[in-house]
Amino acid sequence: MSTVQPVRASFRVLRNNRRLLVFPLLGGAAAALVAGVLAVPALLRGWAEPSPSASAVAAVAVGYLLAGFVFTLCGAAMVCAVDDVLRGEPVRVGVNCRRALRHWRRLLAWSLLNTTVLVLVRQLERVPVIGWFMDELFSTGWAVATYLALPAMMIDGLGIAEGTRRSARMLRETFSRQVYGSVWIAVPLVLSVVVGFVAFMLGAESNSAGLAAAGGVLAALLLVCTLLVGATVSGIFRTVLYRDASAVA
């Protein structure tokens, strides 16, 4: 299949089903709430002390894990919703969230595995000279190899091990489309950041507090909207790509 088709299909799905924007919005709001309730107070206590306490470190770790689980849960619900849309059914936010929640143990385990791998890989930064390169290499490799694991678990009901293996097996078939899709999904984000930065700088250079504030608000709105759309299209694209690869396999 052409590398262009899944990207076009993803934007078309979002254009016709704007309720899909709810899933990353819920994920971001819930993750922010978790961070506020657990991580932020622990960090404040840690800064007030000479050295971070064990409870502060534990709270940050739990908050990080819960935030990752929330994102995973909302991503799983979006996969279910996109799968329904591609089968001709409407987006039902509540139904898809409940469908994802039925697999909360599997999703929590996947989130824990993913977080653990990334934390361990991050330790490679301590290696002299080549640590940063090794960190980026292994982080990217893990992300690419497991890119389709979540759709495999939610659409075909696979376990973590089998879903990860299927995602890795599909890598040769989908790698070029992963790269192409990621680039084109990122382009609007980059453009919005540039436009927002220019608007803010023009407002700041005008020596007018009102124009500077307006430029800042415009930049923030552009960034938030683009992040929301980008996250939604990315989730749609992942599901479309998995379905296409499964049909070929």
Image (cartoon, rainbow, N blue to C red):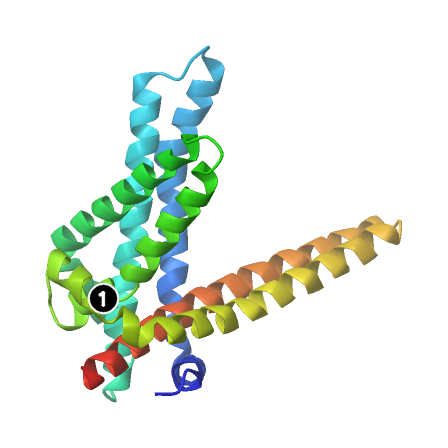
| Front-lying residue, 142 or 227 | 142
Examine the rendering and report whether any part of residue 92 can be seen: no
Indicate the position of residue 89 as horizontal and vertical percent values. Answer: 24, 85
Position in image of residue 82 (x %, y %)? 29, 76
Q: Residue furthest front?
A: 129
Residue located farthest toward the right when viewing the structure as drawn: 207
The residue located at (22%, 66%) in the rendering is: 167
Q: Secondary structure at mark 1?
A: helix
Q: Position of residue 172 (x, y in %)?
A: 29, 72
Residue 130's place in the image compared with 68, above or below, is: above
Image quadrant where residue 191 sits: bottom right
Check the image and report above or below for 38 versus 71.
above
Q: Is residue 10 left or right of residue 226?
A: left
**In this rendering, position of residue 249 left or right of residue 209:** left
What residue type is disc 1 on? Ser
Which quadrant of the figure contains the C terminus? bottom left
Residue 58 spot, x, y in % from top left: 29, 26
Residue at 39 percent of width and 39 percent of height: 35
**Quarter of the rendering occupied by the N terminus:** bottom left
Q: 126 or 189, which is in the foreground? A: 126
In percent of the image, x 54 and y 65: which residue is there?
A: 226
Judge by depth and name the residue closer to the eye, 119 or 56. Answer: 119
Q: Which residue is mark 1?
A: 167
Q: Residue at x 31, y 29 (%)?
A: 59
Q: Is residue 105 left or right of residue 5?
A: left
